[in-house]
Amino acid sequence: MTRCNVRIASPLRSYTGNAAEVRGSGSSLREVLAQLDRDHPGMRFRMIDEQDAIRPHIRLFVNSDEALSIDATVQNGDTVHLICALSGG
């Protein structure tokens, strides 16, 4: 089983009991996000829309590489970063 570390952006930490990092599993972002949603219900919907696309205000990285889809590969020991864009006026 592929295990990874998942760094959680501040706006999403309410789903993880304020944890900044959690363990994830899966060989793609799709699988990692599904596992995260089982452990932290509702979290995936904040990042992924109904068409399985990454929401415009979210950036997902595997290590230092931005993932443009949830089918990006995740390898054992990788770090997945969940980033929320800031906006204001």
Image: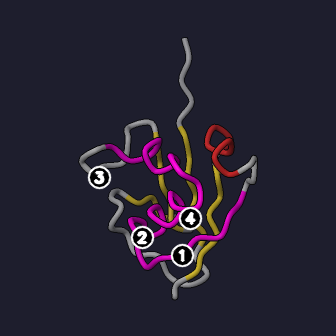
Q: Quadrant of residue 69?
A: bottom left
Dot 2: few (<14), some (14–19), or many (≥20) neighbours within 10 Å? some
Q: Position of residue 6 (x, y in %)?
A: 62, 63
Q: Tell me the residue that label 3 is attached to.
A: 52
Q: Is residue 21 above or below residue 5?
A: above
Q: Please report contact status of discs 4 and 3: CB closer than 8 Å, yes or no.
A: no
Give the residue at x 68% y 45%. Answer: 13
Q: Is residue 20 magenta?
A: no
- Viewer-nearest of labels 2 and 4? 2
Give the residue at x 52% y 84%. Answer: 2
Of callouts 3 and 2, the N-terminal one: 2
Q: Position of residue 66 (x, y in %)?
A: 45, 58
Q: Please report contact status of discs 2 and 4: CB closer than 8 Å, yes or no.
A: no
Q: Amino acid at mark 3?
A: Asp
Which stretch appears magenta? 21-49
**Alpha carbon separation for disc pair 1 and 4:** 10 Å
Q: Please report contact status of discs 1 and 4: CB closer than 8 Å, yes or no.
A: no
Q: Please report contact status of discs 1 and 2: CB closer than 8 Å, yes or no.
A: yes
Dot 4: few (<14), some (14–19), or many (≥20) neighbours within 10 Å? many
Q: Quadrant of residue 4?
A: bottom right
Q: Amino acid at mark 2?
A: Glu
